[in-house]
């Protein structure tokens, strides 16, 4: 078996795309008499800024000998538009089975999804493993190429994307896809197929806006259902199509963290307590802070002055493009126990989803008089409360119920704002109730 990893053949300006390059390589391999067992689309760390938005790397699993696959991989790199200085493609050809790569290469794959890796490490590791490698530009693409080689061994949760490509002469022009047929097809196969359409806005999430060769990509847990949805879409002619096995929709980028230990450019799942109430700022972005730990602050159920103690805080944000998700974030209150998930950049966690673990249900209030119903007044420091008119008294504040329009469980951004690698709640497997967006 041979595994060919490819990365960074994307170019914003000229519309090349790594999935297209992989589909093209698969065709060359078949033309050379090989069988393509699997096309792998691996989403790497979404925090890597110098990459195009998706940060995708690709692997082709084939029975063609590595010696014969290598020149084909090199030709594929030449497809990449290296005139674009931001495009630095790389390819790695491994002469082993996809699940037989060295453990260090598998570890490298997971690291490239969760942290930031450098080309030097990738080069050394590929050479140590005895893999052939090819690069153009500064070789940054070797990182993704090697990660794509190691991914099959490193990961266990996989989904599918069926991608239809445009005729080359149409690249860069407006796409012709019938939105109604997309909606109907998506509805008929949900939830085996997800993130096809954003139902609230009607936006066809499966149709990209970039000048890349992709006409649409149908994602889901069942490759046949993805294919069936694609078949039902009315559109301009499809030039070629391919089904990818992918780590999209798996949350594999998230690592368990704490408010104290998070670092920029990685993504985390953190248990905490809301320490500063949600606040909507200019541009419609919503911010709140969480403090570490699953326990509520000492003393009253609602901390009196959440800004005053020395606990570490992590600012979390739901940005404007997350749309209705912001209403769920705004509904949080100080003292709620939550789990927040998202990438940390500039010390702020960009919320992708959160779980409500326990809601604050009451707040301390001045008691009311049982006789006249009026609000009691303080009887003096430490003396409780009393009603002067009725001579009734109470020992202290009482718990007044708060109306909450949140329930325990997981909430997520809508499909239109989902990161490729984020797991839609509808896929299941979450610890708690879920409130899926579709
Ligand atoms: Zn009274």
Image (cartoon, rainbow, N blue to C red):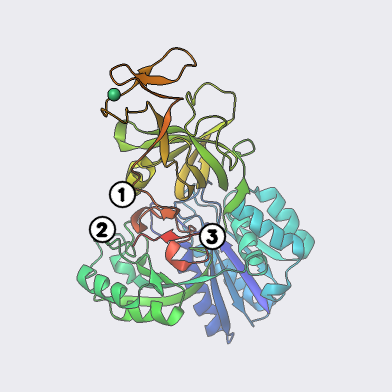
Query: Where ligand 1 lies, by quadrant?
Result: top left
Residue 161 x %, y %: 44, 71
Does residue 382 lie above or below 249 as drawn? above
Frontmost of labels 1 and 3 is 3
Residue for point 42% across, 42% down: 361
Q: Residue at x 56, y 78 (%)?
A: 38
Could you say where residue 71 lies in the image, as x and y percent from the top left? 62, 72
Would residue 290 appear left or right of 145 to someone viewing this image? left
- In the foreground, 243 or 343: 343
Q: Which mark identifies residue 21? A: none
Per the image, label 1 sits on a secondary structure element best described as loop
- For label 1, the residue is 324
Total of numbered circles in the picture?
A: 3
The residue lying furthest to the top in this view is 380
Residue annotated with mark 2: 200
Of labels 2 and 1, earlier in sequence is 2
Toward the front, the furthest residue is 391
Depth check, front residue: 109 or 26: 109
Residue at mark 3: 431
- Where is the C terminus found, in terms of image quarters? bottom left
How many residues crowd mark 2 within 10 Å: few (<14), some (14–19), many (20+)? few
The reply to whether residue 95 is visible in this rendering is no
Q: Earlier in the sequence, mark 3 or mark 2?
A: 2
Name the element at disc 3: loop
Residue 381 location in percent, x, y? Answer: 47, 13
In this picture, residue 295 sits left or right of residue 171? right
| Cα–Cα gap, marks 1 and 3 | 23 Å
Q: Report if the CB atoms under discs 2 and 1 are less than 8 Å apart.
A: yes
Q: Secondary structure at mark 2?
A: loop
């Amino acid at each position: 078996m041979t595994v060919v990893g490819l990365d960074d053949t994307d170019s914003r300006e000229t519309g090349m795309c790594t999935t297209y390059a992989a589909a093209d390589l698969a065709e060359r391999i078949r033309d050379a008499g090989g069988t393509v067992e699997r096309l792998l689309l691996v989403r790497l760390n979404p925090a890597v800024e110098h990459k195009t938005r998706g940060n995708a790397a690709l692997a082709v699993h084939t029975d063609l000998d590595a010696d014969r696959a290598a020149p084909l991989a090199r030709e594929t790199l030449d497809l990449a538009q290296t005139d674009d200085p931001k495009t630095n493609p790389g390819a790695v050809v491994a002469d082993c089975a996809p699940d037989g790569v060295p453990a260090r290469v598998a570890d490298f794959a997971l690291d490239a999804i969760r942290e930031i890796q450098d080309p030097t490490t990738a080069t050394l590791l590929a050479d140590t493993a005895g893999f052939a490698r090819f690069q153009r530009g500064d070789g940054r693409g070797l990182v993704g190429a090697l990660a794509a080689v190691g991914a099959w061994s490193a990961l266990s949760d996989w989904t599918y994307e069926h991608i239809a490509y445009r005729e080359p002469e149409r690249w860069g022009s407006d796409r012709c896809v019938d939105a109604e047929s997309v909606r109907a097809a998506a509805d008929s196969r949900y939830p085996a197929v997800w993130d096809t359409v954003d139902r609230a806005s009607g936006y066809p999430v499966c149709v990209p806006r970039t000048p890349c060769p992709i006409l649409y990509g149908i994602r889901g847990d069942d490759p046949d259902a993805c294919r069936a949805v694609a078949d039902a879409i009315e559109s301009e002619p499809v030039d070629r199509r391919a089904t990818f096995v992918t780590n999209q929709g798996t949350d594999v980028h998230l690592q368990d963290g704490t408010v104290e230990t998070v670092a920029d450019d990685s993504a985390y799942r953190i248990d905490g307590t809301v320490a500063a109430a949600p606040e909507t700022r200019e541009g419609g972005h919503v911010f709140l802070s969480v403090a570490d730990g699953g326990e509520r602050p000492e003393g009253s159920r609602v901390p009196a002055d959440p800004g005053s103690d020395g606990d570490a805080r992590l600012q979390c944000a739901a940005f404007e493009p997350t749309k209705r998700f912001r209403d769920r974030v705004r509904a949080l209150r100080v003292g709620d126990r939550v789990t927040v998930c998202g990438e940390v950049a500039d010390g702020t966690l960009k919320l992708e989803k959160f779980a409500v673990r326990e809601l604050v249900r009451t707040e301390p209030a001045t008691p009311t008089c049982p006789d006249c119903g009026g609000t009691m007044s303080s009887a003096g420091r430490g003396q409780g409360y009393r009603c002067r008119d009725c001579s009734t008294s109470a020992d202290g504040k009482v718990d007044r119920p708060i109306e909450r329009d949140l329930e325990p469980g997981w909430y997520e951004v809508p499909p239109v704002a989902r990161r490729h690698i984020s797991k839609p709640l509808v896929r299941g497997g979450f610890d708690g109730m879920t409130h899926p967006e579709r």
